Amino acid sequence: MKLKLKDWIWRYLPAEIVGTITALTSAIIANSFTHSALVSSFAGTWGEFVGYYGFFLFQELRTSMSQYKKENTRYGITSCFINIRNLVLEFGIPEWLDSSLIRPFCMYFFPKALDNFVLGIMAGKITADIVFYIGVIIAYEIKKKHLKG
């Protein structure tokens, strides 16, 4: 279990840091213009989405291209679609639930409940992350077991 925990931390923590920065930045900017908790919650959700998956897509493509180069084979459009497919298999269902329901609710609820916008956004983000990672880690472990490449 210790090795799995280390694997999960190395896999998800860098993207999580980027996602946190983009979530906070997006929510704060949206709030400064609209003063709407609802708009800010969705801006934070989508800001995190862009930062988090942008990081993952970059990492996956870079790793894959490096592997193809080592094998002296060509990285083409099919290879790119395989990378995207693997990300969708790992994140698809948990992300759909997270982005459409859980994270916007948490990022709306916690700032109001705590009466502190930034602290509430962070509390909402962390709560949503816990729910999100339960599904993602299960999918990641299944993907590692059954998919190569």
Image (cartoon, rainbow, N blue to C red):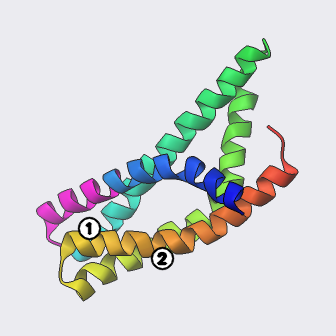
> How many angstroms separate mark 1 from mark 2 (CA)?
15 Å
Can you see residue 148?
Answer: yes
Dot 1 alpha-carbon crowd within 10 angstroms: few under 14, some 14 to 19, many 20 or more:
many
Q: Looking at the picture, does residue 65 appear above or below residue 107?
A: above
Q: Quadrant of the N terminus?
A: bottom right
Dot 2 alpha-carbon crowd within 10 angstroms: few under 14, some 14 to 19, many 20 or more:
many
Q: Which residue is mark 1?
A: 40
Q: Which residue is mark 2?
A: 102
In the visual, does 54 lie left or right of 6?
left
Furthest residue toward bottom: 113
Determine which quarter of the picture holds residue 120. bottom left
Q: Looking at the picture, does residue 123 appear above or below residue 11?
A: below
Q: Position of residue 131 (x, y in %)?
A: 55, 75
Find the magenta span and give its range.
22-36
In the visual, does 14 lie left or right of 69?
left
**Dot 1 amino acid type:** Ser
Furthest residue toward top: 72
Q: Quadrant of the C terminus?
A: top right
Q: Position of residue 113 (x, y in %)?
A: 26, 88
